[in-house]
Image (cartoon, rainbow, N blue to C red):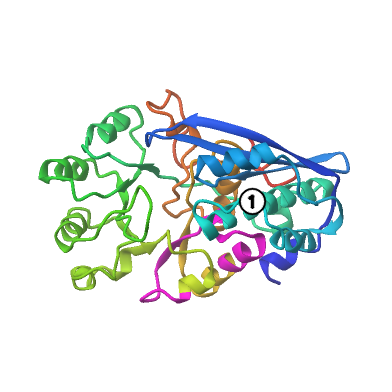
């Protein structure tokens, strides 16, 4: 039986919903806004988090209020199909279809949480998959004036911390040498697959090669293979190239230039419970490794992503450090990797 087939028949009663806005200045130098969906029904509450990046889209959602027609008796699968047919944006989102996927997942995840709570079941119990200790890495950009001290200072306080770094053509030999000496870099993100965003990073063979050579044990995420010379530059690195930004569906995995060894499955980027479950099943059937990624969640969304990772891919380089690591400088006493599983007794939540 497929993963989704175990979840879709769950009965679901929806009486209404509320929206809660969250906001935080985070380590990458911007103010993050998100919206928590509080879905009510039968005396229970289900939670999901909208992680659309554009602040104005969050503000418009919150200003419009709970206007969607969600009330009624459903199955979980029927409710998710109903949500998919709705326009969840008061106005066209800034970044189009990917934002629609993020918002859709917020309502699907809230519905999953509510249906499980109404049934008195926990997600891992229903799936018959015990969550395992969750390996995580901390995602970090060193900025336009790269300072590796951000890594070394964190390691002084958290010696076992591992990192996923946004690689940059601005890294000189001294920066690279300092980072390499830490032995703590598990993944390097070339940011080569973004278009029209503030993190777009043009590809160039020289710095791609310097980064690949300097960290021979690290995953190389999202190189731009369409740029001149990059395919040749990374010809011997296929087994450690992994993909994040392009992956929204099984079709995206199948359309890659070559079969991947590893992909980043972000639940919100898949945009729906059925598509996400199909992605997990596909990777398992085709022996493709997976890891989870965070999206600066401020509420329940980070824990839900951690729970899914603990169930489906606990040992990957999961970019799912506890959200407190996003506040700079991080506080003392934060949990170290691996995180011990903390699934809620019922529902779809990671207990804080």
The spot of residue 91 in percent (x, y) is 61, 50
Question: Could you tell me which residue is drawn at 55 percent across and 45 percent down?
Answer: 51
Q: Is residue 171 above or below residue 289?
A: above
38 left or right, relative to 52: right
Q: Is residue 300 visible?
A: no
Q: Nearer the viewer, residue 132 or 112?
A: 112
The spot of residue 150 in percent (x, y) is 28, 32
Q: Is residue 170 above or below residue 220?
A: above
Question: Could you tell me which residue is drawn at 58 percent across and 41 percent down?
Answer: 58
158 left or right, relative to 69: left
The residue most toward the front is 91
Q: Residues within 10 Å of mark 1 (few under 14, many from 20)?
A: some
Res 183 → quadrant: top left
The spot of residue 49 in percent (x, y) is 62, 43
Question: Could you tell me which residue is drawn at 46 percent across and 53 percent down?
Answer: 315
Q: Nearer the viewer, residue 25 or 166?
A: 25
Looking at the rendering, the stretch of residues picked out in magenta corresponds to 254-279
Q: Is residue 98 visible?
A: yes
Q: Nearer the viewer, residue 129 or 270?
A: 270
Does the magenta run of residues contain 200?
A: no
Which type of secondary structure does the marked residue at label 1 adopt? loop
263 left or right, relative to 306: left
Does the magenta run of residues contain 274?
A: yes
The spot of residue 244 in percent (x, y) is 42, 59
Res 80 → quadrant: bottom right
Question: Could you tell me which residue is drawn at 38 percent across and 51 percent down?
Answer: 197
- Identify the image quadrant of the C terminus: top right
Q: Is residue 239 above or below residue 46?
A: below
Give the residue at mark 1. Answer: 89
């Amino acid at each position: 039986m497929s993963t989704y087939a175990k979840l879709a028949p769950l009965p679901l009663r929806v009486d209404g919903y509320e929206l809660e806005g969250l906001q935080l200045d985070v380590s990458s130098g911007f103010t993050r806004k998100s919206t928590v969906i509080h879905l009510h029904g039968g005396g229970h509450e289900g939670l999901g988090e909208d992680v659309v990046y554009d602040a104005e889209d969050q503000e418009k959602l919150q200003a419009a209020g709970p206007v969607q027609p969600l009330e009624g008796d459903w199955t979980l699968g029927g409710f998710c199909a109903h949500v998919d047919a709705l326009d969840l944006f008061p106005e066209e989102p800034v970044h189009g279809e990917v934002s629609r996927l993020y918002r859709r997942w917020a309502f699907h995840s809230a519905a999953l949480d509510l249906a499980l709570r109404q049934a008195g079941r926990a997600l891992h119990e229903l799936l018959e998959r015990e969550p395992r200790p969750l390996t995580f890495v901390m995602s970090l950009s060193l900025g336009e004036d790269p300072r590796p001290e951000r890594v070394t200072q964190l390691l002084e306080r958290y010696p076992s911390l591992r990192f996923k770094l946004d690689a940059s053509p601005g890294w000189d030999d001294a920066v690279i040498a300092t980072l390499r000496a830490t032995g703590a870099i598990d993944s390097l993100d070339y940011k080569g697959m973004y278009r029209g965003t503030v993190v777009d990073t043009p590809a160039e063979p020289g710095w791609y090669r310097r980064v690949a050579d300097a960290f021979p044990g690290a995953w190389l995420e999202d190189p731009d293979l369409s740029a001149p010379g990059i395919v040749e530059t990374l010809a011997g690195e296929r087994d450690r190239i992994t993909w994040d930004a392009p992956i929204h569906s099984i079709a995206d995995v199948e359309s890659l230039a070559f079969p991947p060894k590893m992909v980043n499955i972000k639940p919100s980027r898949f945009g729906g419970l059925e598509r996400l479950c199909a992605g997990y099943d596909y990777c398992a059937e085709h022996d493709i490794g997976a890891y989870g990624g965070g999206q600066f969640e401020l509420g329940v969304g980070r824990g839900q992503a951690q729970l899914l990772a603990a169930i489906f891919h606990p040992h990957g380089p999961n970019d799912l450090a506890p959200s407190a690591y996003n506040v700079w400088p991080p506080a003392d006493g934060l949990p170290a990797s691996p995180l011990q599983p903390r699934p809620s007794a019922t529902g779809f939540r990671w207990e804080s």
